[in-house]
Amino acid sequence: MNLHTFAGLPLHILLVHFMVVGGPLTAIAVLLHAFWPAARRRLGVVTPIAGLAILVLTPITVEAGEYLQSVVGTTPALATHVERGEGLLPWSIALFVVAAAEWVWWRFALGPGFDVRLTSGVRWGGTVVVWVAAAVIGVGFLVEIFLIGDSGSRAVWGGLHL
C-alpha cells in the first residue's frame, strides 16, 4: 500500500487543492475575525478549527510533495517550489496560533463577565496585539501560499506555450 498516492494519483496533487483553497480562506477568516465584529460572531470557533486543519495538512502535503519529487526528479523550477513549500510550516503554525488566540481573546477575555476584570488599557492593548498579529500573519500567509502556488504551477506548466 502506497501512502503517497490515492486512486493512482499522487497525494500531493490532491492535497495541494485543499491548501490552495483552504489556506487562503483560513487566512481571510483570521482577518475577518479580527476586524469585523459581525463576521467574528458568525465564524466563531470555525476559524481556529480551520487553522488547525491547515496546520495538520501542511507537513502531510510537504511530505507527499517530497515523494512526488523523488519520482519525477528535480528541475530548477521544481527546486524553487520545494524550497518555498518547505517554508510554509512556520506560517501555518502562526496562522493557527493567531486564529486560536483571537478566538480566545474575543470569546473569553472580552466576553461577558471576564472583561470587567481587565482595565481599559489591557483591553485596548490586547485588541491592538490581536489586530497586528492577524494582519501580519494573515497577509503573510496569503503572500506565501501565492508564491508557493505560483512556483508550483511554473514547475508544472512553465515549459508549455499555449
Image (cartoon, rainbow, N blue to C red):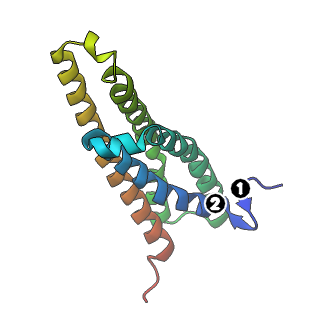
Residue 110 in percent (x, y) is at: 30, 23
Disc 1 packing (10 Å; few <14; some 14–19; many ≥20):
some
Does any portion of residue 135 appear in the rendered image? no
Q: Are marks 1 and 2 in contact (CB under 8 Å)?
A: yes
Q: Relative to 34, say whether 157 is above or below.
A: below
Residue reaching furthest right? 1
Q: Secondary structure at mark 1?
A: loop
Residue 8 in percent (x, y) is at: 75, 68
Mark positioned earlier in the residue sequence (1 or 2): 1
Marks 1/2: CA–CA distance: 8 Å
- Mark 1 vs mark 2, foreground winner is 1
Amino acid type, callout 2: Leu
Residue 4 is labelled as 1
Does any portion of residue 133 appear in the rendered image? yes
Q: Residue at x 70, y 67 (%)?
A: 9
Residue 130 in percent (x, y) is at: 27, 31
Q: Which residue is mark 2?
A: 68
Instruction: Say left or right for 95 vs 58.
Output: left
Instruction: Say left or right for 65 vs 45.
Output: right
Residue 55 in percent (x, y) is at: 52, 41
Q: Residue at x 73, y 62 (%)?
A: 6
Amino acid type, callout 1: His
Residue reaching furthest left? 121
Q: Secondary structure at mark 2?
A: helix
Disc 2 packing (10 Å; few <14; some 14–19; many ≥20):
some
